[in-house]
Amino acid sequence: MNANVKFEIIADAFCRTTGMLAPGKDAWAGPSHEERRDAFAKWRDQNNTIINSMIHAVEHVYGEDRQDIRCPFCDEDDFDLVGLKHHLTQNYCAEYDKI
Ligand SMILES: [Zn+2]
């Protein structure tokens, strides 16, 4: 799992448990960047064991550095998770865009 995917998973868990966007995410309202940075650091320290277990579990389920994920809409393959996300959300999949 690359660093960007790992950060996205951790940032999503942080948001779900605290209601705050992780530092590095664009927050238009709510706590300042500094408040989120400090809360994120504290949250990571307090939950380090769970966070590491969660990352290892995701790698176990999906395979570490998996590069062969197939798009379920157009059947194109050879994506990693970030590549598939980009393919679907940046209008590169004509079949997905038809929905
Ligand atoms: Zn596709």
Image: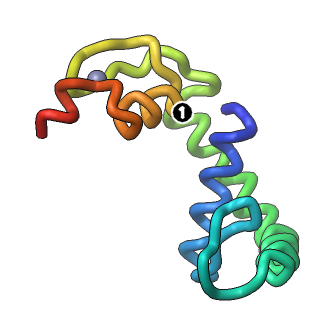
- Residue 96 shows in this picture: yes
Name the residue beneath numbered marker 1.
82
The front one of 31 and 60 is: 31
- Residue 14 shows in this picture: no
Q: Quadrant of the C terminus?
A: top left
SS class, disc 1: helix
Q: How many marks?
A: 1
Q: Is residue 75 left or right of residue 67?
A: left
Q: Is residue 4 left or right of residue 62?
A: right
Q: Is residue 78 left or right of residue 32?
A: left
Q: Residue at x 64, y 87 (%)?
A: 30
Disc 1 under 8 Å from ligand 1? The reply is no
Residue 58 appears in which quarter of the rendering?
A: top right
The front one of 14 and 52 is: 14
Estimate the x, y position of residue 70 in percent, counting from the top left.
34, 19
Residue 40 appears in which quarter of the rendering?
A: bottom right
Colouring method of the image:
rainbow
Estimate the x, y position of residue 2 in percent, counting from the top left.
70, 32
Estimate the x, y position of residue 85 in percent, counting from the top left.
44, 36
Q: Please, is residue 15 above or below residue 80 in the view?
A: below
Q: Residue at x 68, y 45 (%)?
A: 6
Q: Please, is residue 49 above or below residue 34 in the view?
A: above
The front one of 48 and 86 is: 86
Count residues near mark 1 (Cα–Cα under 10 Å), then give few for <14, some for 14-19, many for 20+.
some
Instruction: Tell me the quadrant of ligand 1.
Output: top left
Q: Residue furthest bottom?
A: 30
Q: Residue at x 83, y 73 (%)?
A: 37
Q: Please, is residue 18 above or below residue 10 in the view?
A: below
Q: Quadrant of the N terminus?
A: top right
Q: Three-letter amino acid code at disc 1?
A: Val
Q: Residue at x 81, y 63 (%)?
A: 48
Q: Is residue 98 left or right of residue 89?
A: left
